[in-house]
Amino acid sequence: MGEVAKDLTAGTVGGAAQLIVGHPFDTIKVKLQSQPAPLPGQAPKFAGAVDAVKQTLAAEGPRGLYKGMGAPLATVAAFNAVLFSVRGQMETLLRSQPGAPLTVNQQVAAGAGAGVAVSFLACPTELIKCRLQAQSALASSDSAVVAVKYGGPMDVARHVLKSGGVRGLFKGLVPTMAREIPGNAAMFGVYELLKQSFAGGHDTSQLGRGSLIVAGGLAGASFWVSVYPTDVIKSVIQVDDYKNPKFSGSIDAFRKILASEGIKGLYKGFGPAMGRSVPANAACFLAYEVTRSSLG
């Protein structure tokens, strides 16, 4: 079985584990990120993460926490094929000789390269997911986007193509790349650093599952710590209306969020994101490593 095929298979299993564990947290994160800034004297739609969970369950039931999961679930194989296969090929290019372990810096470079490639798949997938997840959060806004009630991922894609053409599916590509490149560089670098620290050297092949869970969880947390404000900007741009946009681009979104909400506005939903990142990425990396090892 070829190395690329092994990375594809293991990455797909890891991605599925990550999605199942983490999607409810992601839904709450997007709801908090995309809710409109309240008018003076008014309370925000959601007081915080717990309130967002309560309102979502009351209005939509448990299924509401998994809204928008169809798009990433349908593309999880392709997404992880790109992420782990490109990372694997980057590792091959960076090795001093076949089979040699990579340094932490080389894993950072491999992660950055994988981030470039995966951005082009992540952008349309995230756009569809965010527009589904954000519908109820935007319900109190006068934005035209809330006049559209999406029936599912394919319905979102049809509306987007009708409003913005194929380019519309890549709205937010710049902040997506600004998230994926440094985020994956940090994540894979921290993952390798922790594995080597736990193993006491470069050979990490004998690490137990507990060590892999801890390393994967903390590596996932490092992704969000390094790029979270960029993710907020990506989300607000991707749920923005095509015909009457509130933001002209990433810089404009950054300035308007700062002006209306301050620095706190760039960290809306940070709690759910961190709450998701640790268990979801622990599940992803553990599933990846176990599957990859079983394939030889």
Image (cartoon, grey):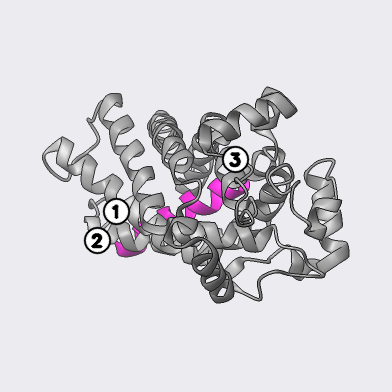
Residue interval drawn in magenta: 78-95
Q: Quadrant of residue 251?
A: bottom right
Task: For marks 1 and 3, give the one nearer the viewer.
Answer: 3
Queried whether the magenta region covers residue 89, the answer comes back as yes
Tag 3: residue type? Phe
Mark 2 near mark 1, Cβ–Cβ under 8 Å?
yes
Q: Is residue 148 above or below residue 22?
A: below
Tag 1: residue type? Gly
Give the side of residue 243 with respect to residue 293, left or right: right
Residue depicted at x 49% and y 57%: 265
Q: CA distance from mark 1 to mark 3?
A: 35 Å
Residue depicted at x 43% and y 31%: 283
Q: Which residue is mark 2?
A: 105
Q: Is residue 252 above or below residue 261?
A: below
Q: Looking at the picture, tell me which residue is in the foreground, 228 or 214.
A: 228
Tag 2: residue type? Asn
Per the image, label 1 sits on a secondary structure element best described as helix
Q: Which residue is mark 3?
A: 46
Disc nearer the start of the sequence (3/2)? 3
